Image (spheres, grey):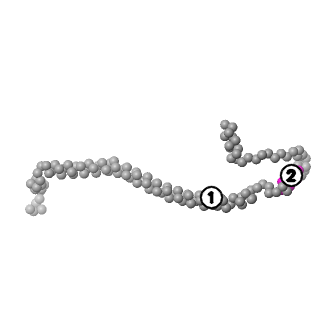
């Protein structure tokens, strides 16, 4: 057999002599089923798989972010715990009774200079912002 002078009809004759009609049908069905599988895979399954891959990578990146945020939160809580005593020490309005008396004296002097009279100083009960919100919720 000469490969240069090979034609399609020669190839067909060799295949027909090699296999009968049933064998050719079996090969045709096998080849066709492979083609159908590839079409289904690339049209239906491949987009679903790609979508899942994207979601998985997003989920993994968010897990890493959560770990980073947890570390930052832990460090921030430790820093807050360390700074709280300093804040409470420096945020008190009056540290002693003498300072309060000094304020009253100063108010009296300024009132006298401006021709005003302080008739009464009342101390009201103080509430935090949280307590005020709670009272508003109870009124509703």
- SS for tag 2? helix
Confirm whether residue 9 shows in the render.
Answer: no
Question: Which percent across, then down, holds residue 19?
Answer: 11, 53
- Whether residue 100 is situated above or below residue 134 in the rendered picture: below
Using residue 128 as the reference point, say whether residue 68 is left or right of it: left
Q: If the image is split into quadrants, where does the N terminus sit? A: bottom left
Confirm whether residue 96 shows in the render.
Answer: yes
Mark 1 surroundings: few (<14), some (14-19) or many (≥20) residues within 10 A = few
Residue assigned mark 1? 77
Question: Which percent across, then down, holds residue 136?
Answer: 69, 40
* Magenta highlight range: 99-108
Question: Which percent across, then down, holds residue 56?
Answer: 43, 54
Q: Residue at x 56, y 58 (%)?
A: 70
Q: Residue at x 12, y 62 (%)?
A: 3
Along the viewing direction, whichever of 81 and 47 lies nearer the viewer: 81
Dividing the picture into quadrants, the one containing residue 132 is top right
Residue 101 covered by magenta stretch = yes
């Amino acid at each position: 057999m000469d490969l240069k002078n090979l034609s399609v009809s020669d190839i067909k004759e060799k295949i027909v002599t090699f296999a009968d009609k049933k064998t050719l049908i079996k090969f045709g069905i096998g080849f066709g089923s492979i083609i159908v599988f590839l079409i289904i895979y690339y049209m239906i399954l491949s987009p679903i798989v790609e979508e899942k891959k994207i979601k998985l990578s997003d989920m993994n990146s968010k897990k890493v972010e959560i770990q980073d945020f947890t570390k930052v939160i832990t460090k921030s809580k430790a820093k807050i715990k360390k700074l709280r005593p300093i804040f409470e020490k420096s945020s008190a309005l009056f540290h002693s009774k003498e300072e309060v008396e000094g304020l009253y004296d100063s108010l009296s002097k300024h009132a006298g200079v401006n021709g005003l009279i302080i008739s009464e100083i009342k101390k009201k009960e103080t509430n935090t912002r949280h307590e005020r919100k709670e009272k508003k919720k109870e009124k509703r």
